[in-house]
């Protein structure tokens, strides 16, 4: 794992948007399409604000989430809603979005169809992940009902319920995340930095982010 420290979060977000854009451009030089996986939550909005204005051939880019909360787009909790507001706009409006949600009461009902659709966009070219202070990443939470499958199984997508998550989730598995050609993790604040350090000394069962640190670049700013 490589750790990049930044003087402040604003600079980090702009710098990271440039890095992701450069990696997507490089991928498009040698491939017909590229894929970008991004987290939801509260951290990545400013990255999306910069990235959506980048001049690249977005029509050849598949965009997906690393994980989704099982709620419709009308909910404030929907990660898709965040993407539609802040990433899939401006130049990036022509990207091909691959949703991890479909209208059904539970994720299990739609899992096979959503996983089959993802195939066209795998392996992920550029993957950005967030991390919670409880050391979850994507929706791979400590104590989740399908933790073992998400960490060690061959499935691309896993439906999860976890004590730390208010609604059912659907997440890319560690296998898919680790197959990404470029992997970045973005965290802000002293609490998450301490959690990252703890995760480096822990097993993935207790600290799921540990499962995807090898080969990743972690970007951190205190505030
Ligand atoms: O849907 C989600 O919640 C995310 O994809 C999740 O994995 C997120 O990245 C972390 O929980 C960090 O969230 P914050 O950025 O809000 O701290």
Image: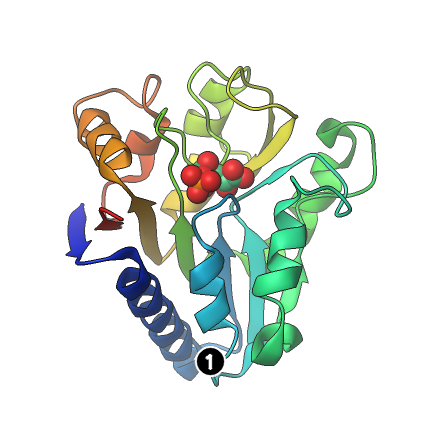
Residue at (34% x, 62% y) in the render? 13
Q: State the residue in front, 158 or 218.
A: 218
Q: What percent of the width, then of the height, locates residue 167?
A: 65, 25
Which residue in the rendered view is the most extreme toward the right?
104
Q: Quadrant of the N terminus?
A: top left
Taking depth in this image into account, of 47 and 176 the one nearest to the observer is 47
Residue 82 drawn above or below residue 149: below
Lateral position of residue 74 relative to residue 47, left or right: right
Figure quadrant of residue 196: top left
Q: Circle 1 — which element? A: loop
Whether ligand 1 has any atom under 8 Å from the Cβ at mark 1 is answered as no
> Quick check: 194 left or right of 58?
left
Residue occupying image coordinates x 46% and y 80%: 54
Task: State how many labels appear.
Answer: 1
Compared across the picture, whether 11 is left or right of 99 comes to left
Can you say whether 108 is above or below 142 in the image?
below
Q: Residue at x 19, y 29 (%)?
A: 200
Q: Residues within 10 Å of mark 1 (few under 14, many from 20)?
A: some
Left or right of 105 on screen, residue 60: left
Rendering quarter of residue 26: bottom left
Tell me residue 14's x, y (percent).
34, 68
Task: Tell me the colour scheme of the image.
Answer: rainbow
- Residue 123 visible in the snapshot: no
Q: Which residue is mark 1?
A: 54
State the residue in front, 97 or 133.
133
**Residue in the picture at 65% in, 68% down:** 96
Residue 9, position as x, y percentages in the image: 29, 56
Residue 64: % across, % down: 57, 55
Work out whether 154 lies above or below 95: above
């Amino acid at each position: 794992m490589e750790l990049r420290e930044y003087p402040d979060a604003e600079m980090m977000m702009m710098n990271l948007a440039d890095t992701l854009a450069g990696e997507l451009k490089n991928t498009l030089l040698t491939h017909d399409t590229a894929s970008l996986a991004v987290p939801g939550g509260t951290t990545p909005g400013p990255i999306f604000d910069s990235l959506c204005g980048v001049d690249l051939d977005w029509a050849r880019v598949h965009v997906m989430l690393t994980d989704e909360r099982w709620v419709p787009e009308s909910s404030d909790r929907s990660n898709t809603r965040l993407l539609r507001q802040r990433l899939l706009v401006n130049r990036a409006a022509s990207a091909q979005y691959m949703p991890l949600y479909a209208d059904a009461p539970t994720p299990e009902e739609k899992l096979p169809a959503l996983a089959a659709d993802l195939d066209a966009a795998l392996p992920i070219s550029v993957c950005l992940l967030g991390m919670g202070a409880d050391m979850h990443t994507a929706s791979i939470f400590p104590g989740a009902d399908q933790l073992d499958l998400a960490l060690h199984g061959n499935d691309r997508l896993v439906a999860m319920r976890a004590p730390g998550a208010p609604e059912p989730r659907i997440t890319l598995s560690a296998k898919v995340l680790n197959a990404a050609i470029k992997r970045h993790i973005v965290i802000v604040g002293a609490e998450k930095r301490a959690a990252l350090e703890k995760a480096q000394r822990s097993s993935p069962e207790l600290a799921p982010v540990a499962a995807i640190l090898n080969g990743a670049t972690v970007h951190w700013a205190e505030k």
